[in-house]
Amino acid sequence: QLQLVESGGGLVQPGESLKLSCVASGLRTSYSAIGWFRQAPGKAREGVSCISNGGMNTMYADSVKGRFTNSRDNLKNMAYLHMNSLNVDDTAVYYCATRTAADCGSDFSEVAYNYWGQGTQVTVSS
């Protein structure tokens, strides 16, 4: 059974950076795009970014463009979300998920994602 585990969350001040990691076990993820989602308190979960299976194509939500970047290492079965210039609106639980396709598609529709991690908390506060 495929399992995804996120790590790297924590408490940071506005303007600081964090790097989230997502490791997959039980199945190679090299055939799947990997997405990152987040859910802030009292809000619906939203898509943040996606990286295609080979890492050549990425997609970002407007709210994080220019600040967040995706990367992945298929040999290690891992994906990363590099978050820079964090602000209080980035506070949320962050999830990684595998997509049922190699590409990211045109939106962050959750029905296209089949396996999810348990999430890691990111808190941005002064």
Image: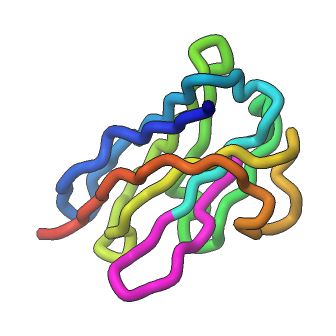
Q: How far from the left and from the top, in percent, is residue 39?
A: 45, 71
Q: How far from the left and from the top, in percent, is residue 79?
A: 57, 33
Say whether residue 93 is left or right of residue 82: left
Is residue 43 one of those drawn in magenta? Answer: yes
Question: What residue is rendered at 80% in x and 68% in y?
Answer: 107
The quadrant where residue 98 appears? top right
Whether residue 108 is visible, yes or no, is no
Q: How far from the left and from the top, in percent, is residue 104?
A: 82, 51
| The C terminus, quarter of image | bottom left
Say whether residue 66 is left or right of residue 108: left
Say whether residue 57 is left or right of residue 93: right
Question: What residue is rendered at 87% in x and 64% in y?
Answer: 106
| The N terminus, quarter of image | top right
Residue bounds of the magenta highlight: 38-51
Question: What residue is rendered at 36% in x and 68% in y?
Answer: 92
Say whether residue 122 is left or right of residue 26: left
Question: What residue is rendered at 32% in x and 48% in y?
Answer: 17
Could you say which is closer to the camera, residue 52 or residue 125? 52
Could you say which is closer to the camera, residue 64 or residue 123? 123
Q: Which coloring applies here?
A: rainbow
- Residue at the extreme bottom: 42
The quadrant where residue 66 appears? bottom right
The quadrant where residue 60 appears? bottom right
- Residue at the extreme front: 1
Relative vertical location of residue 55 with respect to residue 125 in this rendering, above or below? above
Whether residue 26 is visible, yes or no, is yes
Is residue 4 one of those drawn in magenta? Answer: no
Relative vertical location of residue 108 with respect to residue 57 in this rendering, above or below? below
